[in-house]
Amino acid sequence: MIDIHSHILPGVDDGAKTIDDSLVMAQEAVQQGIHTIIATPHHQNGKYINVKEDIEIHVEKLNKALREKNIPLTVLTGQETRIHGDLIQELEASNIATLNNTRYLFIEFPFGYIPQYAEQMVFDIQVAGYKPIIVHPERNRQIAENPSTLYNFVRKGALTQVTAASLAGKFGKTVQKLSHQLIDYNLAHFIASDAHNTTSRGFVMREAYRILKNKHGNDTYYMFMENAQLVIDGLHVHQDEPARIRKNRKVFGLF
C-alpha cells in the first residue's frame, strides 16, 4: 500500500516532533500494510515554512534511520502547500516540492473557505505544466455547503484526495457522508492518511480501504490503489467523468 500524504518528518510542522516519533509512525504505517509513504510537510500555512531543499534533506535522514532500524518503509519527498498568490513563483524557484519529483502537486485550501483567486491559480498551475491535487476537500466548509464548488475544479482538471480518517468517520458523520459522495460522483481520486501521529491523527488506511471496497466496490478500490502508484511514477491517473452532487432540499418540512 502507498500513502501519498503524511506528516512523518520530525520537527518541521504539527506532525512528528522527534525522530523517535517518526520511527513510531513508520512502524505503525508498516503494520497498516504501507510500504511507501510520501512525506508532505506543511508550507505557507501561516506557521510553517518548508522548502524543497530542506525537505529532501529531512527525507534522506529519515530513510537512513529507517534502514538502521530495519523498518521496511520508504519515504519519498512531497509537500502540502497552502494555496497563496506567489505559488507559481515558488514553483519556478524550486521552493515547492512536488510529489516524488513528478508533476503532481498538493494544494491545500483554508478549512473555512476557498480564496476567490483559487480557480485561476489552479488553471495557472496546469498551464505551468503541473497537475494539482486538492487535499482533504471533504473538510472544507465551503465545499461542504456547496459541493458544486469542487465539481468546478475537477471538471477543469484538478484531482482530489480524501483523508482515510474522513472515510472512516473519525471527523464525524457529516464529513464521512460527504467523503462517500465525492467518491460516488467521481470527485475524488485518492485516499491518503494525512497522518500526524499514531493517536489522534493516525493512518487508518487499512480501515478506509476496507470501507472503500465494501461500499464502492472492487473497481473503485483497485483504481484508488493504482492511482497512488501512478502518482509516484509520474503517470496519468485513472479518473472518470465528474458529476455534480445535488444536495437534498426540504420541501414542506420533508426531504
Image (cartoon, rainbow, N blue to C red):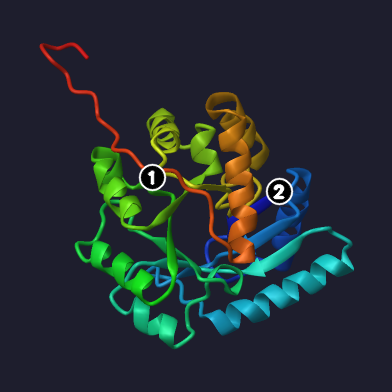
**Circle 1 residue:** 139
Query: For residue 47, what is the image quadrant?
Result: bottom left
Contact flag, marks 1 and 2 (Cβ < 8 Å): no
Above or below — where is 244 with respect to 45? above
**Mark-to-mark CA distance, 1 and 2:** 24 Å
Does label 1 or label 2 sit earlier along the sequence? 2
Residue 10 seen in this snapshot: no
Tell me, yes or no, if residue 11 can be seen here.
yes
Element on which disc 2 rests: loop
Q: Residues within 10 Å of mark 2 (few under 14, many from 20)?
A: some
* Between 117 and 230, the one nearer to me in the picture: 230
Quadrant of the drawing holding the C terminus: top left
Mark 1 crowdedness (10 Å alpha carbons): few <14, some 14-19, many ≥20: many
Give how far across and how far down residue 106 sits, in percent. 46, 63
Q: Secondary structure at mark 1?
A: helix
Of badges 1 and 2, nearer the viewer stands: 2
Identify residue type, mark 1.
Arg
Q: Residue at x 67, y 59 (%)?
A: 37
Q: Amino acid at mark 2?
A: Met
Residue drawn at (54%, 25%), measured in percent from left and top? 215
Looking at the image, which residue is at 28% across and 51% down? 112
Seen from the viewer's position, the closer of residues 214 and 178 is 214
Residue 40 relative to residue 66: left or right: left
Which dot marks residue 1?
Answer: 2
Residue at the extreme bottom: 93
Name the spot of residue 15 as percent of width and height, x first.
57, 60
